[in-house]
Image (spheres, rainbow, N blue to C red):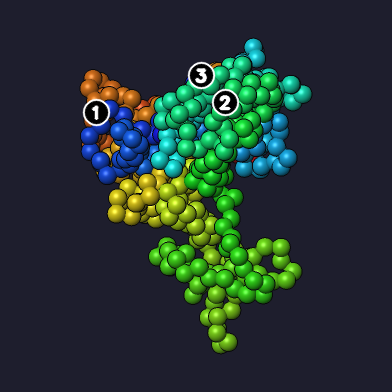
Amino acid sequence: MLLEFRTKNFKSFKDELVFSMTPAPKQKGLDYSILKEKIGSKEYKGLSSAVIYGPNASGKTNIIGAMDVLKSIILRGHIRNGDSKSKANPAAGQLELIPNRSLQKKTPVDFEIKFIANDLMFEYKLSLDLGGFLDEDYKRKVVSETLSVNEKLVFSRNPSLEFGDLNVIKKYVIVGFEGNEESLFNLAKNNLNPSELFLMNGFKIMFSSKLSDIIKNWLEDKFMVFCRADSLQSLPLSSKKATIYINSTINEAARIFGINSNALGYLANDDDSEPKLVSLVGGQNGNMPVQAEVFESYGTIRFVNLFPVVMSALVNGGTLVIDEFDASLHPMALMSIVNIFHNDEVNKKKSQLIFNTHNPIFLNSNLFRRDEIKFVERDDESFCSTHYSLSDFGTSGRNGVRNGSEYMKNYFVNQYGAIKDIDFTSVFENLLESRGELVEDGSKSEG
């Protein structure tokens, strides 16, 4: 369960971004959205969902991109560029794309993430010297790195390495640790690599592979970050050649959503490198496979590619973070998915859904809590983004937001910010004028 994510000097976020998934104080109503996890004597609370609003190019996608970048860096274990480049999020592999471009002075890029996994609360902080924007040949280094478990410091690197009270992870340390602590401490301190994360290298090898694996497995399996929802393509885990694989759960959901065929499946041929989504269409010789992209609507294809990751998040207790979640999908289908994450009887694994959108239908006090509605706006002069929640406005005063207020109406009259007036009239007037098709009073010229 994700509790909080922070970053600073990441793309458009020059100042610190604090993306909280913990309930804001004094928020009433919609208590079914609260996830609870008890660790020892302390209870942690998390939000089951968050929706992010803002104009195009405001920085919404950069929030999700920052999460994806931190995930990629930790899993790689170093701050060298990745071997493969991601079309969805190039910055995950090309770290020279990360620093804010407006800063004249080289400033570290900071990340921090708090999450719960395997009945442990992790807090990991990472500060990186990546040079300036597009500084491709810069010799990067880790400035600082800190790991805390259950609010107890495990190690701190800034730049030298210090250790906290390791009793908090006593049951997870490697065999032979006890009695050799001082030797391992000195070995670790003398073998730090400036471009490698201690967490996934020295700490994993010399102190606790179990703890490192818990973090790695949560990032790989539970922290499901998708920077380009339109590029999602879900394929079956296994499929024999020259066979059609049909997932009954996906088909059941697709029929409710709306399909043009009898069923949807994945066809694998000897000539194909991967299975293809097909529609099974009834005919004289029974069901025949037809390429789904030809037979089904684009919205149906998007839904079939998206639904498996929603299923995976709910079944495995994942945190699903997805950009443009609502593209080409009917609002009723999306509202149903949101309500499932809010349903305590279904969402038993404490799953979370975080997404960007332009659809105002989610600005609804009956669907989202005030602290679940997030905004991003960008300054047109500095090109820097700021992030805040609807709950930050409070409930009193002229700009107060009360539970039950008309969020959608207030958003469109610019009460909350993160909205931009857009009028293309001047563009077309200039175009027509350049073609000699406008006269001074603005009417169309004859001939």
| Real-space CA distance between mark 2 and mark 1, rounded to the nearest whole angstrom | 46 Å
Q: Position of residue 365 (x, y in %)?
A: 27, 39
What is the x, y in percent for residue 407?
A: 30, 35
Q: Residue at x 56, y 19 (%)?
A: 162
Of tags 3 and 1, the one toward the viewer is 1
- Residue visible at 30% across and 50% down? 344
The residue tagged 1 is 26
Q: Quadrant of the N terminus?
A: top left
Element carrying mark 1:
loop
Residue 106 in the image: above or below residue 145:
above
Which residue of the protein is positioned furthest toward the front in this rendering? 179
Indicate which disc residue 15 carries: 3
**Mark 3 vs 1, N-terminal side:** 3
Q: Nearer the viewer, residue 209 or 8?
A: 209
- Give whichever of 358, 437 is nearer the camera: 358
Q: Residues within 10 Å of mark 1 (few under 14, many from 20)?
A: few
Which labelled disc corresponds to residue 181? 2
- How far apart marks 2 and 3 lie (CA) works out to 39 Å
Residue 330's quadrant in the figure? bottom left
Q: Amino acid at mark 2?
A: Glu
Please say if the residues under marks 3 and 1 sit with CB atoms less than 8 Å apart: no
